Amino acid sequence: MRVWRALCLAVVAAVVLWAVAGAGALGRPTRPNVLLVSIDSLRADHLGTYGYARDTSPTIDRLAREGVVFETAISSAPWTIPAHATMLTGLPPEVHGVVSARHRLAPDALSLAEVLQQAGYDTVAFVSGPTVMAQYGFDQGFARFDESMAEPDRHKSSKGITSPGLVALVDGYLEGWDAAGRTAPFFVFLHMWDVHYDYAPPAPFDRMFDPDYQGDVRADDFERNPRINPKMARRDLEHVLALYDGEIRYTDEHLGRIVARLEGLGVLDDTIVVVTSDHGDEFFEHGMKGHAKTLFDEVLHVPLVIRHPRSIAHGRRVEEQVRLMDVAPTILGLARVPVPAAFGGPGMLPHHRFADLTPFIAGRRATAPVPALPAFSANSVLGLQQSLRTQEAKLIRLQNQPTDAVMTRLFDLVADPGEKTNLAKSRERPAFAGTLERKLASWRDDTGHQGGHALALQPTATHEARLRALGYVQ
């Protein structure tokens, strides 16, 4: 496997050197820069570009107007570690195997950063959450992996503010990149943590969306706070949602400073800007709060916005469903970097692998519909959960442990987008039920034959307690 992986990277490097040799203007980047922004815990339906009424996301909305919005992007997992492993490798959780806080990505998993580094990119990461740190293998392929803003102490990480520090780090990097002559394109992976609970944005964002609230409910210690429960007063829950929205607006403003910095350097239009998330959060739509518990759309439907005016026309909206595992190959496609054969689970069936979305969004007249892409998601924090989502329907399979009893949920997303009516219990079996069950069985069989790319990681007792407090360990 490692020999094959090395050979693939060597081929990429050779193709890149050939391209650079004939690309003109030596000493200047010949490929677009890449900025991949992952805003932790960000629901798509709380952004203006996705129809939200509150003005939570002026920066993201602007990027959306000037680029492409994917209206239905589905994460592979409802929590941080497995979702980011998918985002950065194009591998689903069942294949990369990093499905708990006791796993880390193995060196034989080929990452987006490694491919871009072999293509001549300066690869840099700035992360701010305790579950996106190097100990989980996320530093693979990065020449610089800066986790100085990631606070491993769960009390501090939940209450701390990281966005200003991230902006300063990115500013410092861009200043150095500019001063050094911009000799290579950059790939910056930016992980923004502030939206993640606890929801305690600084003033004026703490009252921006609910200035008249007279109650005393706060979102401190969100996971364990007994006052935040399914039976809480509707007015108090509205305030919690307003605090969540305040966190989004605060984070969005700091993203805007980075966008402004790129504009000031004159490189924004030469940079592929991708804004997405690993998962969303639940607010009792199905009885739960936070994330890492279910596979409903509250946690799986994430934003995906890409801006690159050199290749993507302004104002495109893609209605068809896409997946988080499609992000990395699409970045490679837009950057014109060949996708190595070893990238993204080459042993998987073609219809189960990632999709490079470039042919459907690049060019002034790119109007071809995206092919039907089934979205498979998984979670093992509470039992073994798997789901299959199409544009029209969704199947969720929950296998309880240790009893192995299986529960099924089935939803018609056209008639019931809120996933309120479980058709698995209906007397008349929907026509699409059998199709979804066969597709999910095929997926389980295919991914079950793939080799894992995870190594065992034994957290310290202190780290285990922090993960438990965050809800990632039961």
Image (cartoon, rainbow, N blue to C red):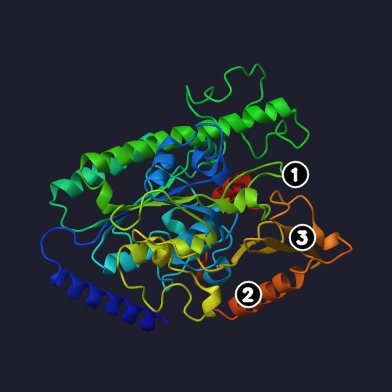
Q: Amino acid at mark 3?
A: Arg
**Vertical side of 249 occupied by 291: above or below:** below
Q: Label 3's element? A: strand
Residue situated in front as seen by the camera: 12 or 356: 356
Residue on which disc 2 sits? 443
Q: Amino acid at mark 1?
A: Gly
Q: Residue at x 49, y 69 (%)?
A: 354
Where is residue 321, by image quadrant? bottom right
Distance between the alpha carbons at the discs numbered 2 and 3: 17 Å
Residue 174 left/right relative to 71: left
Locate the N terminus by quadrant.
bottom left
Q: Which mark is residue 75?
A: none
**Vertical side of 127 occupied by 15: above or below:** below
Q: Amino acid at mark 2?
A: Trp
Q: Residue at x 40, y 34 (%)?
A: 253
Crowding near the residue tagged with mark 1, few <14, some 14–19, many ≥20 C-alpha atoms within 10 Å? few
Q: Label 2's element? A: helix
Distance between the alpha carbons at the discs numbered 1 and 2: 29 Å
**Vertical side of 232 occupied by 77: above or below:** below
The percent position of residue 384, horizontal first and vertical second, equals: 70, 64
Q: Residue at x 36, y 76 (%)?
A: 340
Of the image marks 2 and 3, the number of the one nearer the N terminus: 3
Crowding near the residue tagged with mark 3, few <14, some 14–19, many ≥20 C-alpha atoms within 10 Å? some
Residue on which disc 3 sits? 409
Q: Is residue 219 visible?
A: no
**Label 2 with label 3: CB-CB less than 8 Å:** no
The percent position of residue 36, horizontal first and vertical second, equals: 38, 53
Residue 11 left/right relative to 374: left
Residue situated in front as seen by the camera: 372 or 268: 372
Residue on which disc 1 sits? 287
The percent position of residue 224, horizontal first and vertical second, equals: 67, 38
